[in-house]
Amino acid sequence: MRRAVFENRYRDYVETIRSYNAIAKGYRFWRARPWPITRVVKGRAVLDAGSGPCINGVEVALRNSGYVVCLDMSKSMAYTAREVLEKRRVLGDAVVGDATSMPIRSSSLDAVIAIALVHHLPRELALMFLTEVQRVLRVGGMLLVTIWLWKQRRFLLQTIINYIKTLGGLLGYPRRYTVYWRTRKGKFKRIYYLYTEKELANLITKSNLNVVSQGLVGYLKNKSNNIYVIAVKSRA
């Protein structure tokens, strides 16, 4: 019953998870390199939330001679993450689980990475996730979040339409976008909620984490098409 209620209330999120299940194997090769910004992450016990193939979490664990939990709602992605762990010979686990209700002990992690996760979460789920991050981090632990920047040319027309719909009461959030992943098997819908830098920082602060750095960053060299925020847990 609880699952049915969740799926009905958060249809966008559930549909996005199904799409990632379908594209998991190909996605692994599309995002085969870790994000450069993950070099700032320190700690021996790390969580890669919404890990996908866990390229970022594995890299952090390797660099710090640590342990990583690769957590993803997509079963296919978790299987792919396990293959990456074995190939790179990294100590860790690939877990199928919900980032808004983590199967992880409180105050047990040194760092949490959330690369391209939060922009799939509507505000209520984003707050639930960040509250969970605050719970599982040790005092002094670090959170790194990245989301797509909404001020991109490809979103311009949709942004104008969205704001008109929002003013007319037809849309609940003005920066909700549908982006398709195309393969030979078809196209798969992914829903994005692209928060502004201020909105993202405020969500993190509201979750009792202290923002220490924020700005723009890119996956590719000379690109700044993502927002990043780094925060720390200063108290239990």
Image (cartoon, rainbow, N blue to C red):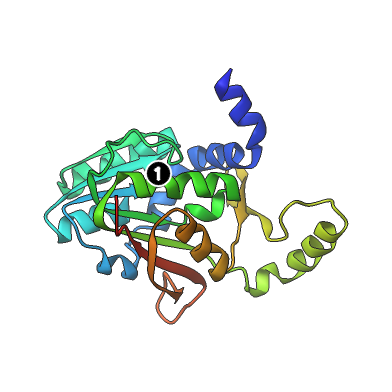
The residue positioned 51% from the left and 38% from the top of the image is 22
Percent coordinates x, y for residue 152 in the rendering: 62, 73
Name the one closer to the observer, 193 or 222. Answer: 193
Q: Is residue 63 above or below residue 28?
A: below
The residue positioned 55% from the left and 50% from the top of the image is 120
Percent coordinates x, y for residue 44 in the rendering: 16, 53
Residue 93 shows up from this direction = yes
Name which quarter of the figure residue 146 lies in.
bottom left
The residue positioned 20% from the left and 46% from the top of the image is 87
Residue furthest front as drawn: 235
Q: Is residue 81 above or below residue 9?
A: below
- Quickly name the residue at label 1: 132
Percent coordinates x, y for residue 81 in the rendering: 31, 43
Residue 52 shows up from this direction = no
Amino acid type at image mark 1 = Glu
Percent coordinates x, y for residue 200 in the rendering: 52, 63
Name which quarter of the figure residue 38 lies in.
bottom left
> Left or right: 222 with respect to 9?
left
